[in-house]
Structure formats: structure tokens, C-alpha cells
Image: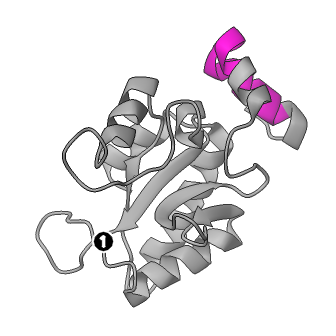
Amino acid sequence: MDAISLTRLQTVHPELQRRILQLDQLLTASSPAIHLRVTQALRTWPEQAALYAQGRTAPGPIITNAKPGTSMHNYGLAVDCCPDLPGLPTWQPDWSTTDERWKQFLVQALTFGLAEGATWRTFADAPHLYLQELPADPDDNLLQLLTDGGIQAVWDWVNQTYGFSS
């Protein structure tokens, strides 16, 4: 995994980091090799607000229906990943989600306990991965934990509730 992805992974829950790294190792060793990049990890509320505004009050297409506080990215519990376009001298994203490499990436993600937004009915989000044990969207409990104790309080609760270690 490239340095950009590794830096981004440092901002999310350790169990999510571990599973993404395992997925990357498997895909890199596959034939043909599939190289992933983490394109998004932890998102601040202002970053989420800017993405939500896109296509609504700011230029560009709508890329999320999640307002600040309603995305698992805001809690360090989701990442967006995509494969590269093979054969190029520098890393370039492959956004063609119908490509066989995307299908392989998403199938393998499931084997590592990652749920993926590609199957969402109302707003499919192929790059979005999160821990399968967790809900797709944060609830009032997570919001309260984040508000009162910060991201570490959220992660501590996740660890205690789901038996993850830090």
C-alpha cells in the first residue's frame, strides 16, 4: 500500500486499519495484482459539510447524502478505497466500478469482514467500506460519545461493544 493510503489509514479505527491492510495484501498478491488507494478516511465535520454541499449549493455532482455527523467517516469508522488503473507510470484511480477488478476488490472486502456501500439501494457508494459488525450509519449513541468524549470515546465504545482490541 502506498504512503498516501497508509497515512490516511492512521486516522481510522485500528480494526478497520487491520482489515484494509489484509485486503490490500491479498489483492496485491493476486494475479493480476490490484493496487488499492485509500481515497478518504476520517473526515472532519467541515469536510463532510463541503462534500454534502457539492451538487447542492456548490459546484459538482452530488457524491454524498450524508450531512456532518451522519457519516461513519466522521467517526473514523469508514474508508473509501479504489483500485488503480494498471500499466501507468503513476497511480491513477480506476472509477469504472463495473470493471472486473472492482468486482474482485468488493468480493474480497467481504471476506475480511468489511461491509461495502456498493450494495446500498438508495445511494450506492462503491468505494465505501466499514466494519461489518457496525451499522452503516452512526446512531445517536455514537454522536453523543463523539460530542462528549471525542473520537477515542467512540473507539473505546466500539472496542468494548464488539470485542476489538486497540
Q: Residue at x 28, y 73 (%)?
A: 94
The residue shown at (17%, 80%) is: 87
Residue type, numbered disc 1: Trp
Magenta-span inclusion, residue 151: yes
Tell which of 92 and 54 is nearer to you: 54
Quadrant position of residue 110: bottom right
Locate residue 85, reporting x and y percent. Answer: 24, 76
Say whether residue 156 is left or right of residue 30.
right
Left or right of 65 on screen, residue 159: right
**Would you name the residue on which mark 1 appears?**
95
Q: Residue at x 69, y 11 (%)?
A: 149
Q: Position of residue 74 (x, y in %)?
A: 54, 33
Q: Quadrant of residue 43?
A: top left
| Magenta-tinted stretch | 145-159
Task: Tell which of 85 and 44 is nearer to you.
Answer: 44
Whether residue 7 is in magenta: the answer is: no
Image location (x, y in percent) of residue 155: 71, 29
Please determine whether, in this image, residue 13 is positioned above or below residue 145: below
User: Which quarter of the picture shows residue 4?
Assistant: top left
Q: Residue furthest left?
A: 89
